Image (cartoon, rainbow, N blue to C red):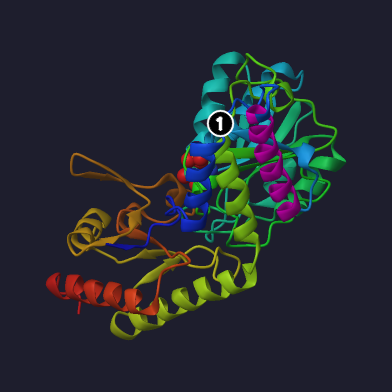
Amino acid sequence: MIYFDHSATTPIDPRVLALMQKVAEKHFGNPSSIHKSGQKARAIIEKARRQIADALGVKPRNIIFTGGGTEANNLVLRNILYSNKKHVITSAIEHPAILKTLKDLGKFGVGHSIIPVDKYGVINIDKLKSAIQDDTGLITVMYANNEVGAVQPINDIAEIAKKQHILFHTDAVQAPGKISINITDAVDLASFSAHKFYGQKGVGFLYVGDKIKLHPLIIGGGQERNLRAGTENTAGIAALGLAMELANTKLDDSIAHLTKLELYFKDQLNSIYPNAIYNGHPDSHLPGLISITIPSITSDILLVSLDLQGIAVSSGSACSSGDVKPSPVLSAMNISNKHNISTLRISFGKDNTIAEVDVLINALKNILKKHNKL
Ligand SMILES: Cc1ncc(COP(=O)(O)O)c(C=O)c1O
């Protein structure tokens, strides 16, 4: 199988897997236990915390391990229930872990404003500014979008929030390994997930700025500075620490590799099919993430045809019982329903090669021919 769906999840790096196996086998002590086995597990967790802190240029105490990106986002958003400022501002292109949670919080008196994006998928800062109310307690805007890769002006928004004494959170799940991450003083909270950068699924972390006080979402033991109860996933956390370190080393090389694959793909496809439409920001986007509309062939047909040829990609649109539903992200970018349901997401990863891209181009060529598009 040729895998081009790295924005959905990445394969685990063999070095990360080897560490995870070793920790699971040998260092199974409870990190809260006093004995040596417990102390070893504790030391492994603290090492991972340091690796992450070093990669982000923050302090280890700013890192709170969670069960992934969705949980980190929920931890942040559900804290608004404890605030006397119960209005949240977000963007129209957030992951459901943000948008659905905000909808749910509406049942408990939390209001929210959804700020539109432009045709490139970038948030409108002026509209964000004018949505600020006296009771706005949180602004949450993703670092980079998972469907079209548009990178958001996070640091500008964080500064706006800081000036107004509003907490600022970013869902940075898609960023590691693809873009240099800048957690400035104005960023209060940021969510991450290991499986997006060659770590294990079901483990992630929340960056929590120095002065930020949070209430736990999961209550029980005192783990993670009382912010996330439950015996730690030592092996998954060790793997996450190494994965983060690896994502940060040779980042420029990774970006260059992903960019090379992306440009090669676009170049090759343009030479056989110039009618393809690329969505997202032309410059400010995650390298190697391509959102492509092939007018009048629906994404389910494209996706299944490629899958039959052993190529994994995804579509933004949801498909259930043969009925393709438009992607809310593409709709927010004002892309027509017709184009929306004919859009594929191709997301390259560190181990993909030019030869694999050639296979994809060839497969697309055959599909286009079959549908009389060439
Ligand atoms: C932008 C974004 N946020 C959050 C998540 C959820 O992360 P997790 O799968 O770790 O819960 C994802 C994963 O698809 C994502 O792309």
Location of residue 159 with respect to 296 vertically, above or below: above
Q: In the image shown, does 223 or 122 lie closer to the viewer?
A: 223
Question: Magenta span has 12?
Answer: no
For the point 80% across and 31% down, the residue is 212
Tell me if I can see residue 306 in this picture.
yes
Location of residue 350 with respect to 37 vertically, above or below: below
Name the residue that disc number 1 marks.
Answer: 71
Ligand 1 lies under 8 Å from the Cβ of mark 1: yes
Q: Position of residue 187 (x, y in %)?
A: 77, 44
Q: Which residues are magenta?
A: 37-56
Tell me if I can see residue 193 in this picture.
no
Question: Magenta span has 51?
Answer: yes
Image quadrant assignment for residue 364: bottom left
For the point 39% across and 79% down, the residue is 354
Element type at marker 1? helix
Q: Position of residue 68 (x, y in %)?
A: 54, 37
Location of residue 313 with respect to 190 vertically, above or below: below
Q: In the image shown, does 103 or 55 lie closer to the viewer?
A: 55
Position of the N terminus, as image quadrant, is bottom left
Position of the C terminus, as image quadrant, is bottom left
Question: Count of labels shown?
Answer: 1
For the point 54% across and 31% down, the residue is 28
Location of residue 234 with respect to 128 vertically, above or below: above
